[in-house]
Amino acid sequence: MSIPPNSSGASRRKTTVLVVDDAIYSRVALRRILETESDFEVIAEAENGVEAVKKYKLYRPDVVLMDIVMPEQDGIEALRDIVSFDPSCRVIMCSAIGQEKMLTTAISLGAKDYILKPPVAEKIISSIRLVVSTGPQ
């Protein structure tokens, strides 16, 4: 007789994340942090806001980590589109110092948190855990 993985008998599903940044090195760094230093799964990546919206609709991740300044469609416009599609989405904005006004706009549009670049692993992980634990709002 085998013992189930937890008291309910169901295995725990990983929190899925969509990583959005126009810089490939940022996407690679975020993926490494999320997949090696936490129990999160990067379900998809996007390099601009247009791709982010399409991939959000396709994959429906638990959390989106999104840069603000990107080509084709910036993170603010992508956030608007994602919130319009799914008001309960959980988006965390990533921004460089000096973009405080854009971060304020993002929070007012529905972003759940923000992280300053360059990102620190502990801050990324704690931010995701916080927005996941508070659930859709």
Image (tube, rainbow, N blue to C red):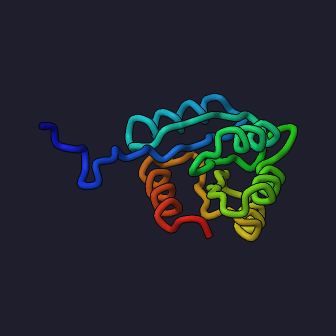
For the residue pair 10 and 28, the one nearer the viewer reads as 10
Left or right: where 126 falls relative to 78: left
For the residue pair 76 and 97, the one nearer the viewer reads as 76
The spot of residue 100 in percent (x, y) is: 72, 63
* Residue at (70, 38) in percent of width and height: 58
* Residue at (73, 68) in percent of width and height: 104
Left or right: where 81 falls relative to 91: right
* Residue at (79, 50) in percent of width and height: 78
Left or right: where 112 falls relative to 132: right
- Up the image or down, 105 lies above or below 126; here it is below
The spot of residue 33 in percent (x, y) is: 45, 39
- Quadrant location of the C terminus in the rendered image: bottom right
- Up the image or down, 16 lies above or below 132; here it is above
For the residue pair 50 and 6, the one nearer the viewer reads as 6
* Residue at (44, 44) in percent of width and height: 14
- Up the image or down, 39 lies above or below 108; here it is above
- Up the image or down, 108 lies above or below 57; here it is below
Query: Which residue ends up furthest to the front in the rendered image?
Result: 1
Query: Which residue ends up furthest to the left in the rendered image?
Result: 1
Q: How many numbered markers are drawn?
A: 0
The spot of residue 132 in percent (x, y) is: 50, 59
- Residue 28 picture quarter: top right
- Quadrant location of the N terminus in the rendered image: top left
The spot of residue 77 in percent (x, y) is: 83, 53
- Residue 18 picture quarter: top right
